[in-house]
Image (tube, grey):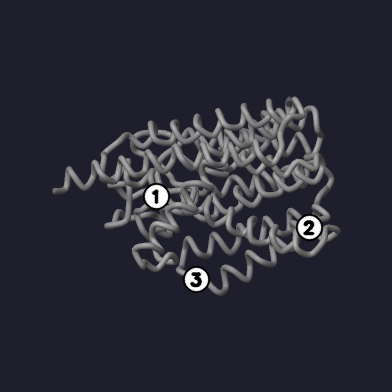
Protein backbone atom coordinates (compact mmCIF):
# COMPACT_ATOMS: atom_id res chain seq x y z
CA UNK A 1 0.00 0.00 0.00
CA UNK A 2 2.83 2.43 0.88
CA UNK A 3 4.28 1.92 -2.61
CA UNK A 4 1.01 3.04 -4.19
CA UNK A 5 0.79 6.11 -1.94
CA UNK A 6 4.35 7.11 -2.80
CA UNK A 7 3.62 6.47 -6.49
CA UNK A 8 0.55 8.72 -6.33
CA UNK A 9 2.66 11.50 -4.84
CA UNK A 10 5.43 11.05 -7.44
CA UNK A 11 2.96 11.07 -10.34
CA UNK A 12 1.27 14.20 -9.01
CA UNK A 13 4.62 15.97 -8.64
CA UNK A 14 5.57 14.83 -12.15
CA UNK A 15 2.40 16.30 -13.60
CA UNK A 16 2.88 19.64 -11.84
CA UNK A 17 6.47 19.74 -13.09
CA UNK A 18 5.27 19.01 -16.60
CA UNK A 19 2.75 21.86 -16.38
CA UNK A 20 5.63 24.26 -15.73
CA UNK A 21 7.67 22.89 -18.63
CA UNK A 22 4.70 22.85 -21.02
CA UNK A 23 3.75 26.42 -20.08
CA UNK A 24 7.31 27.64 -20.55
CA UNK A 25 7.72 26.01 -23.97
CA UNK A 26 4.18 26.62 -25.18
CA UNK A 27 3.11 22.98 -25.41
CA UNK A 28 -0.56 23.84 -25.60
CA UNK A 29 -3.68 23.23 -27.67
CA UNK A 30 -5.10 26.43 -29.14
CA UNK A 31 -8.76 26.34 -30.24
CA UNK A 32 -9.36 26.02 -34.00
CA UNK A 33 -12.20 25.04 -36.34
CA UNK A 34 -11.72 21.33 -35.51
CA UNK A 35 -11.46 21.79 -31.74
CA UNK A 36 -14.05 20.86 -29.16
CA UNK A 37 -12.53 23.26 -26.61
CA UNK A 38 -12.61 27.06 -26.47
CA UNK A 39 -9.57 28.03 -24.35
CA UNK A 40 -5.83 27.41 -24.59
CA UNK A 41 -5.07 24.20 -22.69
CA UNK A 42 -1.85 22.36 -21.81
CA UNK A 43 -1.27 19.41 -24.09
CA UNK A 44 0.45 16.20 -22.96
CA UNK A 45 -0.80 15.78 -19.39
CA UNK A 46 -1.13 12.09 -20.20
CA UNK A 47 2.66 11.87 -19.99
CA UNK A 48 2.15 10.41 -16.53
CA UNK A 49 0.71 7.23 -18.12
CA UNK A 50 4.05 6.07 -19.56
CA UNK A 51 5.80 7.48 -16.46
CA UNK A 52 3.60 5.22 -14.31
CA UNK A 53 4.53 2.22 -16.48
CA UNK A 54 8.24 3.05 -16.15
CA UNK A 55 7.79 3.42 -12.39
CA UNK A 56 6.29 -0.07 -12.28
CA UNK A 57 9.18 -1.36 -14.41
CA UNK A 58 11.67 -0.21 -11.77
CA UNK A 59 9.57 -1.44 -8.83
CA UNK A 60 9.05 -4.86 -10.44
CA UNK A 61 12.75 -5.47 -10.92
CA UNK A 62 12.62 -4.74 -14.67
CA UNK A 63 9.99 -7.28 -15.72
CA UNK A 64 8.51 -7.36 -19.25
CA UNK A 65 11.40 -5.37 -20.81
CA UNK A 66 10.36 -5.67 -24.48
CA UNK A 67 6.92 -4.32 -23.69
CA UNK A 68 8.37 -1.40 -21.73
CA UNK A 69 10.85 -0.58 -24.52
CA UNK A 70 7.97 -0.57 -27.01
CA UNK A 71 5.83 1.62 -24.77
CA UNK A 72 8.73 4.05 -24.27
CA UNK A 73 9.21 4.26 -28.04
CA UNK A 74 5.51 5.07 -28.40
CA UNK A 75 5.74 7.74 -25.70
CA UNK A 76 8.81 9.41 -27.19
CA UNK A 77 7.55 9.56 -30.78
CA UNK A 78 4.12 10.69 -29.56
CA UNK A 79 5.60 13.46 -27.43
CA UNK A 80 7.63 14.68 -30.40
CA UNK A 81 4.43 14.64 -32.47
CA UNK A 82 2.74 16.74 -29.77
CA UNK A 83 5.55 19.28 -29.95
CA UNK A 84 6.13 19.27 -33.71
CA UNK A 85 4.17 17.73 -36.57
CA UNK A 86 5.94 14.55 -37.67
CA UNK A 87 5.62 12.71 -40.95
CA UNK A 88 2.92 9.99 -40.89
CA UNK A 89 5.54 7.61 -42.31
CA UNK A 90 7.80 8.15 -39.30
CA UNK A 91 4.92 7.64 -36.90
CA UNK A 92 3.75 4.41 -38.53
CA UNK A 93 7.29 3.00 -38.59
CA UNK A 94 7.66 3.62 -34.86
CA UNK A 95 4.23 2.16 -34.21
CA UNK A 96 5.08 -0.96 -36.20
CA UNK A 97 8.39 -1.39 -34.38
CA UNK A 98 6.80 -0.88 -30.95
CA UNK A 99 3.96 -3.30 -31.69
CA UNK A 100 6.56 -5.84 -32.84
CA UNK A 101 8.23 -5.58 -29.42
CA UNK A 102 4.83 -5.97 -27.75
CA UNK A 103 4.20 -9.14 -29.78
CA UNK A 104 7.65 -10.42 -28.86
CA UNK A 105 6.89 -9.93 -25.16
CA UNK A 106 3.43 -11.50 -25.44
CA UNK A 107 4.68 -14.45 -27.57
CA UNK A 108 2.34 -13.61 -30.43
CA UNK A 109 4.89 -14.83 -32.99
CA UNK A 110 4.21 -18.38 -31.87
CA UNK A 111 0.83 -18.17 -33.62
CA UNK A 112 0.21 -19.05 -37.31
CA UNK A 113 1.13 -16.12 -39.61
CA UNK A 114 -2.49 -15.22 -40.56
CA UNK A 115 -3.22 -14.60 -36.86
CA UNK A 116 -0.05 -12.53 -36.50
CA UNK A 117 -1.00 -10.45 -39.55
CA UNK A 118 -4.52 -9.90 -38.17
CA UNK A 119 -3.02 -8.96 -34.79
CA UNK A 120 -0.87 -6.25 -36.42
CA UNK A 121 -3.88 -4.77 -38.24
CA UNK A 122 -6.14 -4.82 -35.18
CA UNK A 123 -3.52 -3.55 -32.74
CA UNK A 124 -2.28 -0.65 -34.84
CA UNK A 125 -5.87 0.15 -35.80
CA UNK A 126 -6.92 0.15 -32.13
CA UNK A 127 -4.03 2.41 -31.08
CA UNK A 128 -4.94 4.98 -33.71
CA UNK A 129 -8.67 4.70 -32.98
CA UNK A 130 -8.07 5.33 -29.27
CA UNK A 131 -5.99 8.37 -30.17
CA UNK A 132 -8.69 9.74 -32.51
CA UNK A 133 -11.28 9.36 -29.75
CA UNK A 134 -9.27 11.59 -27.40
CA UNK A 135 -11.09 14.80 -28.27
CA UNK A 136 -13.19 15.99 -25.33
CA UNK A 137 -12.74 16.37 -21.59
CA UNK A 138 -13.00 13.13 -19.65
CA UNK A 139 -13.42 10.68 -22.50
CA UNK A 140 -9.92 9.17 -22.33
CA UNK A 141 -9.95 9.13 -18.53
CA UNK A 142 -13.38 7.50 -18.20
CA UNK A 143 -12.83 4.95 -20.96
CA UNK A 144 -9.35 4.03 -19.71
CA UNK A 145 -10.70 3.55 -16.18
CA UNK A 146 -13.46 1.32 -17.53
CA UNK A 147 -10.96 -0.82 -19.45
CA UNK A 148 -8.36 -0.94 -16.67
CA UNK A 149 -10.99 -1.71 -14.04
CA UNK A 150 -12.31 -4.58 -16.14
CA UNK A 151 -8.82 -5.96 -16.71
CA UNK A 152 -8.03 -5.63 -12.99
CA UNK A 153 -11.06 -7.70 -12.00
CA UNK A 154 -10.47 -10.31 -14.71
CA UNK A 155 -6.83 -10.54 -13.68
CA UNK A 156 -7.83 -11.59 -10.17
CA UNK A 157 -9.15 -14.88 -11.57
CA UNK A 158 -7.23 -15.34 -14.84
CA UNK A 159 -3.82 -13.82 -13.90
CA UNK A 160 -2.68 -12.61 -17.30
CA UNK A 161 -0.90 -9.36 -16.33
CA UNK A 162 1.05 -7.88 -13.41
CA UNK A 163 -1.50 -6.64 -10.87
CA UNK A 164 0.78 -3.85 -9.64
CA UNK A 165 1.04 -2.45 -13.18
CA UNK A 166 -2.74 -2.35 -13.49
CA UNK A 167 -3.08 -0.56 -10.15
CA UNK A 168 -0.39 2.00 -11.00
CA UNK A 169 -2.03 2.73 -14.34
CA UNK A 170 -5.38 3.25 -12.60
CA UNK A 171 -3.68 5.64 -10.16
CA UNK A 172 -2.10 7.57 -13.05
CA UNK A 173 -5.48 7.97 -14.73
CA UNK A 174 -7.08 9.16 -11.49
CA UNK A 175 -4.34 11.77 -11.03
CA UNK A 176 -4.79 12.89 -14.64
CA UNK A 177 -8.58 12.96 -14.18
CA UNK A 178 -8.29 15.55 -11.42
CA UNK A 179 -6.96 18.02 -14.00
CA UNK A 180 -8.93 16.84 -17.03
CA UNK A 181 -12.38 15.80 -15.85
CA UNK A 182 -13.81 19.29 -15.42
CA UNK A 183 -15.74 21.81 -17.49
CA UNK A 184 -12.54 23.70 -18.34
CA UNK A 185 -9.78 21.12 -18.37
CA UNK A 186 -6.36 22.21 -17.16
CA UNK A 187 -4.68 19.67 -19.47
CA UNK A 188 -5.37 17.21 -22.27
CA UNK A 189 -3.78 13.77 -22.55
CA UNK A 190 -2.12 14.52 -25.89
CA UNK A 191 -0.63 11.82 -28.11
CA UNK A 192 1.97 11.14 -25.41
CA UNK A 193 -0.87 10.00 -23.17
CA UNK A 194 -3.50 8.45 -25.43
CA UNK A 195 -1.16 6.39 -27.63
CA UNK A 196 0.87 4.75 -24.80
CA UNK A 197 -2.41 4.08 -22.96
CA UNK A 198 -3.85 2.38 -26.05
CA UNK A 199 -0.59 0.43 -26.41
CA UNK A 200 -0.80 -0.76 -22.81
CA UNK A 201 -4.46 -1.73 -23.15
CA UNK A 202 -3.51 -3.67 -26.29
CA UNK A 203 -0.93 -5.60 -24.28
CA UNK A 204 -3.49 -6.45 -21.62
CA UNK A 205 -6.03 -7.51 -24.25
CA UNK A 206 -3.59 -9.70 -26.16
CA UNK A 207 -2.31 -11.30 -22.95
CA UNK A 208 -5.89 -11.99 -21.82
CA UNK A 209 -6.88 -13.55 -25.14
CA UNK A 210 -3.75 -15.73 -25.31
CA UNK A 211 -4.15 -16.85 -21.69
CA UNK A 212 -7.84 -17.75 -22.02
CA UNK A 213 -8.15 -18.59 -25.72
CA UNK A 214 -11.25 -16.36 -25.85
CA UNK A 215 -10.84 -13.87 -28.70
CA UNK A 216 -14.36 -12.63 -27.97
CA UNK A 217 -12.85 -10.41 -25.29
CA UNK A 218 -12.21 -7.86 -28.04
CA UNK A 219 -15.78 -6.77 -27.34
CA UNK A 220 -14.33 -4.99 -24.31
CA UNK A 221 -13.17 -2.33 -26.81
CA UNK A 222 -16.33 -2.35 -28.94
CA UNK A 223 -17.72 1.15 -28.24
CA UNK A 224 -14.59 2.90 -29.46
CA UNK A 225 -14.31 0.32 -32.22
CA UNK A 226 -17.82 1.01 -33.50
CA UNK A 227 -17.35 4.78 -33.46
CA UNK A 228 -13.99 4.57 -35.24
CA UNK A 229 -15.05 2.07 -37.92
CA UNK A 230 -18.38 3.65 -38.83
CA UNK A 231 -16.87 7.14 -38.84
CA UNK A 232 -14.21 5.96 -41.31
CA UNK A 233 -16.86 4.31 -43.50
CA UNK A 234 -18.96 7.48 -43.45
CA UNK A 235 -15.98 9.62 -44.43
CA UNK A 236 -15.05 7.22 -47.24
CA UNK A 237 -18.63 7.44 -48.50
CA UNK A 238 -18.26 11.21 -48.61
CA UNK A 239 -14.86 10.81 -50.35
CA UNK A 240 -12.94 12.55 -47.59
CA UNK A 241 -9.29 11.99 -46.77
CA UNK A 242 -9.53 9.74 -43.70
CA UNK A 243 -5.98 10.64 -42.66
CA UNK A 244 -6.83 14.33 -42.14
CA UNK A 245 -8.17 15.77 -38.88
CA UNK A 246 -11.95 16.04 -38.70
CA UNK A 247 -14.96 16.41 -36.41
CA UNK A 248 -17.04 13.48 -37.67
CA UNK A 249 -17.11 11.14 -34.69
CA UNK A 250 -20.44 10.80 -32.92
CA UNK A 251 -19.00 12.26 -29.73
CA UNK A 252 -17.81 15.29 -31.72
CA UNK A 253 -21.26 15.84 -33.23
CA UNK A 254 -22.75 15.69 -29.74
CA UNK A 255 -20.15 18.05 -28.26
CA UNK A 256 -19.84 20.57 -31.08
CA UNK A 257 -23.04 20.72 -33.14
CA UNK A 258 -25.43 19.57 -30.39
CA UNK A 259 -23.69 21.43 -27.58
CA UNK A 260 -23.80 18.57 -25.07
CA UNK A 261 -21.66 18.74 -21.94
CA UNK A 262 -18.34 16.98 -22.56
CA UNK A 263 -18.39 15.07 -19.30
CA UNK A 264 -21.91 13.79 -19.95
CA UNK A 265 -20.84 12.43 -23.34
CA UNK A 266 -17.70 10.88 -21.84
CA UNK A 267 -19.74 9.24 -19.10
CA UNK A 268 -22.23 7.83 -21.62
CA UNK A 269 -19.42 6.27 -23.67
CA UNK A 270 -17.77 4.68 -20.65
CA UNK A 271 -21.06 3.47 -19.13
CA UNK A 272 -22.06 1.94 -22.47
CA UNK A 273 -18.74 0.10 -22.61
CA UNK A 274 -19.03 -0.94 -18.96
CA UNK A 275 -22.47 -2.44 -19.63
CA UNK A 276 -21.07 -4.40 -22.57
CA UNK A 277 -18.10 -5.55 -20.47
CA UNK A 278 -20.35 -6.90 -17.73
CA UNK A 279 -22.46 -8.80 -20.26
CA UNK A 280 -19.44 -10.20 -22.10
CA UNK A 281 -17.70 -11.35 -18.91
CA UNK A 282 -20.88 -13.02 -17.66
CA UNK A 283 -21.48 -14.84 -20.95
CA UNK A 284 -17.88 -16.03 -21.19
CA UNK A 285 -17.71 -17.06 -17.52
CA UNK A 286 -20.80 -19.22 -18.03
CA UNK A 287 -19.15 -20.89 -21.05
CA UNK A 288 -21.98 -20.03 -23.42
CA UNK A 289 -20.07 -17.60 -25.66
CA UNK A 290 -19.83 -18.80 -29.27
CA UNK A 291 -19.52 -17.28 -32.72
CA UNK A 292 -23.27 -16.76 -33.02
CA UNK A 293 -23.54 -14.92 -29.71
CA UNK A 294 -20.44 -12.86 -30.55
CA UNK A 295 -22.03 -11.83 -33.85
CA UNK A 296 -25.22 -11.03 -31.96
CA UNK A 297 -23.27 -8.65 -29.73
CA UNK A 298 -21.72 -7.02 -32.78
CA UNK A 299 -25.07 -6.60 -34.54
CA UNK A 300 -26.75 -5.07 -31.48
CA UNK A 301 -23.84 -2.71 -30.73
CA UNK A 302 -23.54 -1.63 -34.36
CA UNK A 303 -27.29 -1.24 -34.74
CA UNK A 304 -27.68 0.92 -31.66
CA UNK A 305 -24.71 3.05 -32.65
CA UNK A 306 -25.96 3.57 -36.22
CA UNK A 307 -29.47 4.48 -35.07
CA UNK A 308 -28.09 7.08 -32.65
CA UNK A 309 -25.61 8.45 -35.19
CA UNK A 310 -28.29 8.73 -37.89
CA UNK A 311 -30.75 10.51 -35.61
CA UNK A 312 -28.11 12.92 -34.36
CA UNK A 313 -27.01 13.81 -37.90
CA UNK A 314 -30.62 14.35 -38.98
CA UNK A 315 -31.24 16.61 -36.01
CA UNK A 316 -28.11 18.60 -36.82
CA UNK A 317 -29.24 18.98 -40.44
CA UNK A 318 -32.62 20.19 -39.21
CA UNK A 319 -31.05 22.69 -36.82
CA UNK A 320 -28.66 24.05 -39.44
CA UNK A 321 -31.36 24.37 -42.04
Image location of residue 305, percent across then percent down: 44, 40
* Distance of label 1 from label 3 (alpha carbons): 23 Å
**Which corner quadrant of the image does residue 29 belong to?**
bottom left
Image point 69% across, 41% down: which residue? 291
Image location of residue 103, percent across then percent down: 76, 58
Image point 26% across, 39% down: which residue? 259
Which of disc 1 and disc 2 is earlier in sequence? Answer: 2
**Which corner quadrant of the image does residue 287 belong to?**
top right
Q: Which residue occupies the foreground of this view, 136 or 52? A: 136
**Which corner quadrant of the image does residue 112 belong to?**
bottom right
Q: Determine which of the numbered discs, if any, sits on residue 66 in the image.
A: 2
Residue bearing the label numbered 3: 86
**Residue 241 located left or right of residue 164:** left
Question: Which element is circle 1 on?
Answer: loop
* Distance of label 2 from label 1 (alpha carbons): 34 Å
* Distance of label 3 from label 2 (alpha carbons): 25 Å
Q: Which residue occupies the foreground of this view, 259 or 233? A: 233
Image location of residue 48, percent across then percent down: 58, 45
Residue bearing the label numbered 1: 249
Badge 1 crowding class, 10 Å Cα cut-off, few under 14, some 14 to 19, many 20 or more, is many
Of badges 1 and 3, nearer the viewer stands: 1
Which of disc 2 and disc 3 is earlier in sequence? Answer: 2
Amino acid sequence: MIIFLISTLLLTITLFAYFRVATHFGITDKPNVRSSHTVVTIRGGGIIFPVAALLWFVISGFEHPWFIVGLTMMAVISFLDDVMELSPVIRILFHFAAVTLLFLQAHVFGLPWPYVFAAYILTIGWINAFNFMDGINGITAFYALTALGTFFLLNRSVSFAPEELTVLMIISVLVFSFFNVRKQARCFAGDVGSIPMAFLLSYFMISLILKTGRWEYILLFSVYGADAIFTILDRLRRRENIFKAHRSHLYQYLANEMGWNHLVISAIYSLAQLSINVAVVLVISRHVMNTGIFCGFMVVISGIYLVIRTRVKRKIQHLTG
